[in-house]
Amino acid sequence: MRSLNCSRKEAEEILEADKAIDQGKRMEFDLTPAQEKQAIKYANADTHKPISKPRPERKPDELKESIVAQIADYLPQIQAEQVTIANKNRLIAFSLQGRDFELMLTAKRKK
């Protein structure tokens, strides 16, 4: 009673209320049936799903395509084998002296 700062009568009321809650009895501070139904609906809701936006179509970069094509044409001159353009804008795969390589071209953003 001292730790609760209440009288004996109030402590007994608290204990009775606790017992009633443990037994699942409805209390005056419980949700109304409509509120409880709404709470269950929100508790069973799916997690937040991000909205998928379609990726914007990239503009073709003729300069990068030209550079990749010229490098791909040059590689056989240095005995590179199996030269393939994996991505026409940036990636060339080839073999040289028994080892496999990938050459990636990146362009820096305009300042």
Image (cartoon, rainbow, N blue to C red):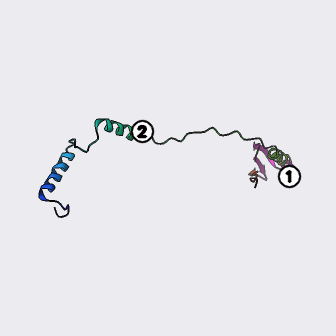
* Residue at the disc numbered 1: 78
Q: Is residue 86 above or below residue 110?
A: above
Extent of the magenta region: 74-99
Q: In terms of image quadrants, where is residue 38?
A: top left
Asked if residue 110 lies left or right of residue 48, the reply is: right
Residue reaching furthest to the right: 77
83, 40: nearer the viewer: 40
Q: Which mark is residue 90?
A: none
Return the disc, 1 or 2, that comes first in the chain's sequence.
2
**Residue underneath mark 2:** 45
| Residue 39, above or below 78 | above
Residue type at the position of mark 1: Ile
Image spot of residue 66 (x, y percent): 83, 45
Taking depth in this image into account, of 89 and 81 the one nearest to the observer is 89
Q: Nearer the viewer, residue 80 or 45?
A: 45
Q: Residue at x 75, y 41 (%)?
A: 59
* Distance between the alpha carbons at the discs numbered 1 and 2: 62 Å
Q: Is residue 44 magenta?
A: no
Mark 2, Cα crowd under 10 Å, few <14 / some 14-19 / many 20+, is few
In this view, the mark in front (1 or 2): 2
Q: Amino acid at mark 2?
A: Ala
- Quadrant where the C terminus sits is bottom right
Q: Position of residue 83 (x, y in %)?
A: 79, 45
Residue 81 drawn at (x, y percent):
80, 47
Residues tagged 1 and 2 counted as in contact (Cβ below 8 A): no
Give residue 26's position: percent from left, percent from top: 22, 41
Q: Residues within 10 Å of mark 1 (few under 14, many from 20)?
A: few
Query: Does the magenta portion include 78?
Result: yes
In this picture, residue 60 sits left or right of residue 11 = right
Q: Look at 76% across and 44% down and name the residue there.
A: 89
Secondary structure under tag 1 reads helix
